[in-house]
Image: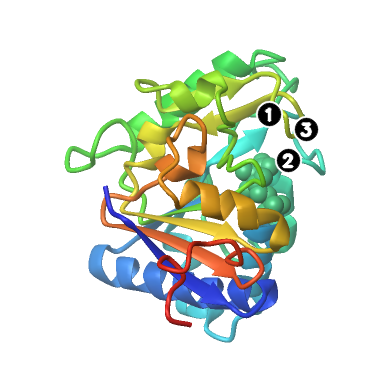
Amino acid sequence: MSAPQLVVHRDKELMAEAAAARLITRIVDAQSARGSASVVLTGGRNGNGLLAALGAAPARDAVDWSRLDLWWGDERFLPEGDADRNDTQAREALLGSVPLDPARVHTMPVSGGADGGYGDDADAAAAAYAAELAAAARPEDHGPVPSFDVLLLGVGPDTHVASLFPELPGVRETERTVVAVHGAPKPPPTRISLTLPAIRAAREVWLLAAGEDKAQAAAVALSGAGEVQAPAAGARGRARTLWLLDEAAAAKLPKDLYPPY
Ligand SMILES: O=C(O)[C@H](O)[C@@H](O)[C@H](O)[C@H](O)COP(=O)(O)O
């Protein structure tokens, strides 16, 4: 697993714009090299802020949107179209305004819903998403998920990533790639989440942390804490682990970690 690299930006707006520019370049490089790219989206203000900045970026359409596979790192287990769903917010922030191939947009299952849905069975929904990931994996991939080019993660003030919360069962999962989360401390309580083994299959993992409410989490996660106590500490990419922070979120980092900025 790759050691964390840090980039600190002046403020959260600049962090979102710089991360969006970085993501455009990464997607374009992957599409040039392999004909397609695979990105895992995250929910929350920083994740949606990145998507909005991407939509406003001058180079936005350097991306071939029809050859982009989108997955989610986690989802609130709510009915289709619910405003609190990460996919609803992603659609509003960007996805509704770019020409994606719907067959390549892999949203996590909704709760309730029509026949063939999973009702309120989040565990069945999680297993279905794990099966969808496994079906998309190729022989050259590293395990039962595709080799995501970039897996985005927001970081919670308690160091959670996706819906893996400190000390809860999800962060301790070592076999399954997707789990249901019950009793999440961040509402809504029922969620679906990739696990650390799935996260660590990504080529690159980018963690987004802006705002002073993330300063303690960044300092804890980057100072050697264990992944069960600080899930963000376990979010590592095979080739790259990149923390994208603003100055407020970097304020409590040990000085030897603070990059030359
Ligand atoms: O479903 C979710 O809530 C997110 O996936 C979650 O993991 C989020 O990324 C963090 O809580 C940070 O959220 P903020 O960027 O809003 O602080």
Mark 3 neighbour density, 10 Å: few (under 14) some (14–19) many (20 or more):
few
**Dot 2 corresponds to which residue?**
85
Of residues 234 and 76, the one drawn nearer to the viewer in this rendering: 234
Disc 2 residue type (three-letter) = Arg
Instruction: Tell me whether the residue at label 3 lies in contact with that at label 1, contact meaning CB atoms closer than 8 angstroms.
Output: no
* Nearest to viewer (mark 3 / mark 1): 3
**At 65% across and 63% down in the image, what residue appears?**
210
> Picture quarter containing residue 16?
bottom right
Label 3 and label 1: CA atoms lie apart by: 16 Å
Query: x, y percentage for residue 14?
Result: 63, 79
Quarter holding residue 18: bottom right
Q: Do we see residue 154 in this rendering?
A: no
Residue at 47%, 68% in the rendered image: 255
Q: Disc 2 vs disc 1: Cβ atoms closer than 8 Å?
A: yes
Q: Residue furthest right?
A: 83
Tell me which residue sits at (60%, 81%) in the image. 57
12 up-or-down from 208: above or below: below
Residue at mark 3: 187
Is the residue at mark 2 in contact range of ligand 1, meaning its CB lies under 8 Å from it?
Answer: no
Image location of residue 4, percent across then percent down: 37, 58
Q: Is mark 3 within 8 Å of ligand 1?
A: no
The Cα–Cα distance between marks 3 and 2, rounded to whole angstroms, is 11 Å
72 in relation to 245, above or below = above
Residue 212 falls left or right of residue 201: right
Badge 3 amino acid: Pro
The disc label shown at residue 110, or none: 1
Q: Residue at coordinates 30% horizontally, 64% vertically from top-left?
A: 35
Dot 2, how many residues are within 10 Å of its Cα: few (below 14), some (14-19), or many (20+)? many
**Foreground disc of the pair 2, 1:** 2
Q: Is residue 189 left or right of residue 132?
A: right
Amino acid bearing label 1: Val
The secondary structure type at the circle numbered 3 is loop
